Image (tube, rainbow, N blue to C red):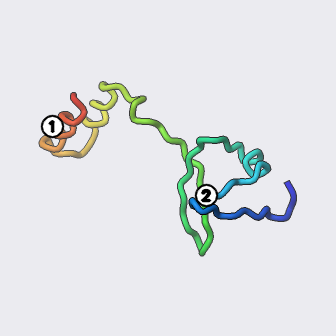
């Protein structure tokens, strides 16, 4: 990758394509998720790992609920929504 920062352009749909060299150096792949922020007038993209809620079993969700600081009423409402 050269020392000169590559120029990218914002599309009409608000999209920016990251140059292949940048993706390669950082190990980024299609579908990766990012947290977007603004720091000192600059756009900052921070890669994040997203775990789909479907990966949690009913038992694991019950553990999360039991360890929470929710009231019994709030726990009952959450259990009802999740069918527990």
Kindly identify the residue that appears in the image at 68 percent across and 54 percent down.
17
Kindly identify the residue that appears in the image at 65 percent across and 58 percent down.
16
Residue farthest to the bottom? 41
Q: Are marks 1 and 2 in contact (CB under 8 Å)?
A: no
Q: Is residue 13 or residue 75 the one in the foreground? A: 13
Q: Position of residue 41 (x, y in %)?
A: 60, 74
Q: Is residue 41 above or below residue 44?
A: below
Q: Report helix, strand or loop for mark 1.
A: helix
Identify residue for label 2. Answer: 15
Snapshot quadrant of residue 65 = top left
Q: Position of residue 61 (x, y in %)?
A: 31, 32
Kindly identify the residue that appears in the image at 65 percent across and 64 percent down.
10
Residue farthest to the right? 2
The CA span between labels 1 and 2 is 42 Å
Q: Report helix, strand or loop for mark 2.
A: loop
Which mark is on residue 43?
none
Mark 1 Cα-neighbour bin, 10 Å: few <14, some 14–19, many ≥20: some
Residue farthest to the front? 12
Which mark is first along the chain, 2 or 1?
A: 2
Q: Position of residue 75 (x, y in %)?
A: 18, 39
Q: Is 44 displayed left or right of 60 in the figure?
A: right
Q: Is 65 displayed left or right of 55 in the figure?
A: left
Snapshot quadrant of residue 39 = bottom right
Q: Is residue 32 or residue 84 the one in the foreground? A: 32
Q: Is residue 72 or residue 58 the one in the foreground? A: 58
Q: Is residue 11 above or below residue 65?
A: below
Q: Is 17 displayed left or right of 63 in the figure?
A: right
Mark 2 Cα-neighbour bin, 10 Å: few <14, some 14–19, many ≥20: few
Q: Is residue 35 above or below residue 24?
A: below
The label nearer to you, 1 versus 2, is 2
Identify residue for label 1. Answer: 76
The number of callouts visible is 2
């Amino acid at each position: 990758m050269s020392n000169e920062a590559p120029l990218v352009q914002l599309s009409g749909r608000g999209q920016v394509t990251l140059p292949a060299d940048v993706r390669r150096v950082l190990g980024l792949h299609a579908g990766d998720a990012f947290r977007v922020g603004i720091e000192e007038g600059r756009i900052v993209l921070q890669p994040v790992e997203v775990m789909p809620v479907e990966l949690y079993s009913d038992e694991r969700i019950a553990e999360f609920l039991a360890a929470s600081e929710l009231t019994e009423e709030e726990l009952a409402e959450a259990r009802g929504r999740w069918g527990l």
